[in-house]
Image (spheres, grey):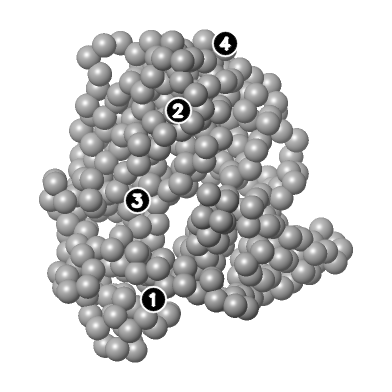
Amino acid sequence: MKKRNLDIPKKPNAIFYFIAWCIIAPFIKIKYNVKYHRMKEKLQEPYVLISNHGNTVDPFLSACAVYPNRLNFVGGYAYAQKRSYGWLFRLAQAIPKFQYQIDLASIKQMIGIVKNGGNLALFPSGRLPTYGENEVVTPAMAKMLKMAKANIYYTKIEGAYLSRPKWSKKYRRGRIDVTVGKLLSKEELALKTVEEVNELVQKTLGHNEFRDYQDKMQIEYKGKDLAEGIEQVLYMCPKCYKEYTISSKGNEVRCSNCGSVWHLNSKGYFEEQDIVRDNHDWSLIIKEKVLEEVQKEGFEMNDEAELRILEKGKEVIYGHGKIKLDKTGITYEGMFRGEEQTIFFSVEELISLPFRCSVNFEIAYNTDVIRFCLKDTKTITKWSLCVEALKKLEKQKSA
């Protein structure tokens, strides 16, 4: 693994930032029909900018919303390793971070940026929403904000998920609204407890694309084949509860077991609303069934997995073996780095299970981020949901 640069990043170069602004700002404004709602007063630097996350274009939206202020973004370590845009990551003086684990080196860099007069920008949820609702924000975020001792601002991004859902390969043209607001001044931050800051962050960044935005706006997101790929996340029929019988073509979603058919319209809703209005409604049924399943005695999921790690921009295969999920966590048994190993990830340490639809899921291990490529790729979403359900049960027991 390439050795990490642990120096405190500087502010992005002003000339680079200006050129990027001139190119990117008009492009995304036209392509995504972006509406910015900026603050009247000037943002007081240095500050930390936090945002909800709905689309891969979100960093550019946040950067454009507060220009000419320059931002140092925090992003997943894997992105910094990619050949396609890793160079841009480094040129922008972004901080690479291991997702869903305590990364002390990255935290030190984050705090250092603010102390040196820079502006830190990050997406606390850490991953794109699967069903249009912002993913969990860990309480550790509030602790980091307290340590930063800076003004806290936010960008609320709405419409980004509907413009390009996580499960779709195709973009839709509709509208994205980006609102800039002030969460806390550094003086107000100093007077609040970690618990109070955490509650405020959760409330501010909590966002349901359908209930909080589209139900009110009713915007058309026009494109082709609006439903294709949706079965990667909506893998269970909401009527017969059969798994992996859902297929999609064009704007149509169909269950091969009971014959039910749904049509997804340009507003993101199913025209047949007898059971579900949208994919978020559908997800609630799936999550309820998953929660029931993980509570059953002897719950297990098993598969074969190929282990890959991103190095110098390429995925390198580091092993192959068997993987199991049960009530205690995830166990891998097989080859890793040239020798037979058993690796265990407890439910307690599995904050979440980031995944790419029908491709892989990721788990941080020591100084690596392992990508587990399952033999049965259609089950990947379920693995992630099962981990979330087990975490939910864990919290209920400790409450």
Neighbor class of circle 2 (other Cα within 10 Å; few <14, some 14-19, many 20+) is many
Q: Residue at coordinates 53% horizontally, 49% vertically from top-left?
A: 399
Residue 358 position, x and y percent, is 49, 67
Helix or strand or loop: what does disc 1 sit on? loop
Task: Count numbered badges in the picture.
Answer: 4
User: Mark 1 against mark 2, which lies toward the viewer?
Assistant: 2
Q: Residue at coordinates 22% horizontally, 14% vertically from top-left?
A: 40
- Where residue 131 sits, quadrant-wise, is bottom left
In three-dimensional space, the C-alpha distance between marks 4 and 1, rounded to whole angstroms, equals: 50 Å
Tag 4 and tag 1, C-beta contact below 8 Å = no
Q: Residue at coordinates 33% horizontally, 84% vertically from top-left?
A: 240
Neighbor class of circle 1 (other Cα within 10 Å; few <14, some 14-19, many 20+) is many
Q: Amino acid at mark 4?
A: Asn
User: Mark 4 against mark 1, which lies toward the viewer?
Assistant: 1
Which residue is under mark 4?
A: 116
Which residue is under mark 1?
A: 236
Q: Amino acid at mark 3?
A: Glu
Of 93 and 132, nearer the camera is 132
Residue 207 seen in render: yes
Helix or strand or loop: what does disc 3 sit on? loop
Mark nearer the N terminus (4 vs 1): 4
Q: Amino acid at mark 1?
A: Met
Residue 364 position, x and y percent, is 66, 49
Tag 1 and tag 2, C-beta contact below 8 Å = no
Of 239 and 91, nearer the camera is 239
Question: Which of the labelled discs sits on residue 197, or is there none?
Answer: 2
Q: Amino acid at mark 2?
A: Val
